[in-house]
Image (cartoon, grey):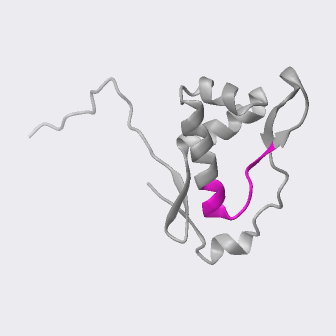
Amino acid sequence: MRSRAYSSSRPPSRRCWLERDGQFVLGDGGLLLLLGILKHGSLLGAARQIRWSYRHAWGYLRRAEAALGTRLTEARPGKGASRGRRTARTPQPRPSRYRDGDWRLGR
């Protein structure tokens, strides 16, 4: 019997996400959202970049923050274009937390 080589034009895909205590925290889209906030300095700009509604992006951040128990973003005060959001300055998780199984990487 002849073996067939993988011939699809679509490459294999992967899915990654973070969980805490079995609860979903952040996935690929959430990571793109946070990177967009870093790039654009606003939740609206980041949501537009990944083609999410502002309401969906806002809710996603609130659920992730609730699951983590810490803020991921904070308001950037100002007027007009100087207003927006930035990623929060929070302490980095201790490496021991990863060893203890608080975080899992899913497929």
Q: Quadrant of the N terminus?
A: top left
Considering depth in this image, is 51 or 58 the residue closer to the camera? Answer: 58
Residue numbers of the magenta segment? 64-74
| Tally of numbered tags | 0
Membership of 71 in magenta stretch: yes
Q: Using the image, determine if residue 76 lies above or below residue 102.
A: above
Please indicate whether residue 54 sits to the left or right of residue 23 in the image: right
Q: Quadrant of the C terminus?
A: bottom left
> What residue lies at 47% left-to-right and 58% top-to-bottom?
106
Please indicate whether residue 8 sits to the left or right of residue 49 in the image: left
From this viewpoint, which residue is outermost toward the right? 78
Residue 100 is situated, as x and y percent measured from the top left of the image, at 63, 78
> What residue lies at 38% left-to-right and 37% top-to-bottom?
12
> What residue lies at 57% left-to-right and 28% top-to-bottom?
50
Q: Using the image, determine if residue 86 lies above or below residue 105.
A: above
> What residue lies at 13% left-to-right and 36% top-to-bottom?
2
Please indicate whether residue 78 sits to the left or right of residue 16 in the image: right
Considering depth in this image, is 90 or 71 the residue closer to the camera? Answer: 71
Residue 4 is situated, as x and y percent measured from the top left of the image, at 19, 34
Please identify the quarter of the rendering in which residue 96 is found: bottom right
Residue 33 is situated, as x and y percent measured from the top left of the image, at 63, 37
Please indicate whether residue 79 sits to the left or right of residue 84 in the image: right
